[in-house]
Image: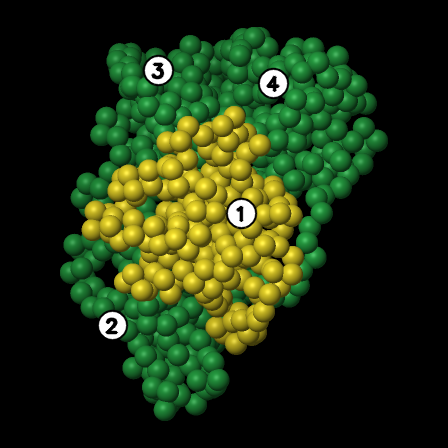
Chain colours: A green, B yellow
Amino acid sequence: MAQKVLLTGNEAIARGVFEAGVRFASAYPGTPSTEILENIAEYKEIIAEWAPNEKVALETAFGAAIAGARAFASMKHVGLNVAADPFFTIAYTGANAGLVIVTADEPGQHSSQNEQDNRNYARSAKVPMLEPSDSAECKDMVKYAFVLSEQYQCPVLIRLTTRVCHSKSLVQLEDRHEVPLVPYVKDSRRYVDVPANAKIRRLEVEKHLDAFKAFSDETELNFIDDNKSDIGVITSGMCYNYSKEVFANTANYLKIGFTYPLPMGKIKEFCSKLKKVYVIEENDEYIEDAVKMLGYGNICYGKYAPDGQRFLPFNGELTADEIRKSVTGQGCALPQYDKTKIVARPPALCAGCPHRGLFYQLSKRKNVVISGDIGCYTLAFAAPYNAMDFNSCMGASISSGHGAQKIFDQNADNQKRIVSVLGDSTFFHSGMTSLLNVVYNKGNNITVILDNRITGMTGHQQNPGTGFTAQNEPTDAVDIEGLVKAIGITNIKVIDPNDLTAVNDALDWAINNKEASVIITRYPCVLKKFSQLDKTQFPEAFKQKCAVDQNKCIGCKACLKCGCPAISVTDKKASINAEMCVGCTVCKQICPVKAID
Amino acid sequence: MAKNILLVGVGGQGTILASKILSLGLTTANYDVKMSEIHGMSQRGGSVTSHIRFDKDKVYSPVVELGDADIIVAFEKMEALRYLDYLKKDGKVVVNDYEIPGMPITSGVCDYPKGIIEEIKAHRDVIVVDATAEANKLGNAKITNMILLGTLIGKMKLTDIDWDTIIAQNVKPQFVELNKKALRRGIELAE
């Protein structure tokens, strides 16, 4: 097979996993990593699973590797925080067959809550790491990572960034190489991590790290491109491409593809011939610190210049523009045009989004403090709802809400009630344990589970509530009411969020209840491809359209408060874009003069 | 020197399919091609961009630099202005004469800005195409993207590539003929 195809980094990782003979892969969706498992799921040779969270994904992959199969897990950068617990200990044990983990970092925070640099995880957990710079390297490196993982009996981390994940370049496809299962042999001295065993494994880790240090100086993954210059660039990942655009053949390059442990010998050899070295990397000063440690701080320009002043930007994506600006001291000349003619396009809940009814009603309430979570509904923080007070990470809506409510309630006159809001997939991810905490510690939170029957924000992945697996096989759909009941909640209501009266009644009921309660708002995502179950349960969904009777409309703009992108007001009359409207009727219920039908 | 193209528009306008067909077509002509998009939150009615860079030599960065695009194709009028900083001094902007108001406009915070095309004309070379109207004439507003892609292909002199085959491989069978027709119409509009 000699075919060259255009693939994204994510598609190339999936292809590499396939060609490497992997038999098991698991992930939890998260931008920019989601499409890796979606593409793996297309290969029938691989068992591909959506796990409820990243910790479970890594643990299942670990189990598969113990059982003798090449195994793989992928996640976004903050996902590795969730999976950090197994990650640090698997670093000690390794597995019977190859185990490779992908972390997809987000310099620039296009769809993320922070800009953490997961290269620090490699160093911290003592796990070797590779960093591809384009799709061809994604495929090659994932295959090589399995070889290294088996040779050194340890997991291997691959660090991607958004641009690597979501940009396309040419990749040479190859055939799948079937790898026989490694026979399972019980080895509790290795795999049971009681201190007596783990202490021995700790020594093994140091042994293979020493071997990797030598490997890093020898491998072709870390190469020097000598252009006979006295200026040099040390770089990795996507920044290699940006650097080539900026410096072309005017600088020498040390391109690092194996970034933990760093090739200290090669860095030293490279720097020793230079008058000036630029270290070009996104996020933290990971390589820069090593260059300085080797004594080249006086010629090193990275996030800091030798005089200690800031040099390259410390945040955001480090594009060729940004590098050029820092290096030459000036940006390119831009046209001076009237920028007031550009109006922002903030992301909004879609027309027909089943979260709209809840947030419209919540936005009108005083004395509610809304503890938010990660998903489409986070957009409710913005106008016109302004319906979110705080939000940090997956599942935290319930737990942070519990803590806040306990303190509010210390005030005898407290009127504030916490309403925690989170989606179905986020509840399965880590909201369930938080809810258990509320029951156990006698909290009185109001939790709203926005059950839109799919994982929405990342582009519609199946989850334990949808009735289908990652490979589209029918499976049991978890009963959320039953689950909540089993956790110990006795006050449960299931409502249609498009029915504003039902939403209001449920909120009144919950607020007036002294005990913890759960409201489940159940309606499918407007963008979801309906399953047979959805069609049976919601036969009327999205089959109508609403329109404004121009004679009745008084131009009061009350309908705009529901924040629907299909509604606009021109010349003091509201109108509804018929192409966008799906007839959820939320605006119809709001209109004070019944002008919408 | 690599050629740099930027497709800009609003989520849902079909920039992704257009950039896919464009980059696949370029690979058949033995160019090295890099393409970059950002997916995620911007899909929800937000501003979207696709960067495409190609050359007979190796292309490194998948991202077009500021002041370096040979051509910007704006699927929506205001988006042309939003990304004007990316255009070369002697670059061209193909603008679809079509307005999609964002949330601040529909909710009455401000009006859709007037005089956008005049503003761009004062600084750069503009080609105005009424692509959505042309698409409607062909029977479906959704093929606006293929009309604009056709105009781009015409302007970039890439008409030798077998676009029909690429379309046939990437569009649902029932829409292949319509998309081919739209692409041809777009090429005519570039002349």
Q: The residue marked by circle 3 belongs to what chain?
A: A
Do circles 2 and 3 both sit on a common chain? yes
Within 10 Å of disc 1 (Cα), the crowding (few <14, some 14-19, many 20+) is: many
Parent chain of label 1:
B
Residue A389, how many percent across, how many down? Answer: 54, 62
Residue annotated with mark 2: A544
**How far, Cα to Cα, is label 1 from label 2?**
41 Å
Report the mark closest to the observer, 2 or 3. Answer: 2
The amino acid type, in three-letter code, at marker 3 is: Asn
Amino acid type of the residue that numbered disc 2 sits on in the rendered structure: Gln
Q: Nearer the viewer, residue A158 or A479?
A: A158
Q: Which mark is residue A96?
A: 3
- The label nearer to you, 3 versus 4, is 4
Q: What amino acid type should be assigned to the residue bearing mark 1? A: Ile
Asked if residue A258 is positioned above or below residue A534 in the image, the reply reads above
Q: Residue at x 78, y 31 (%)?
A: A305
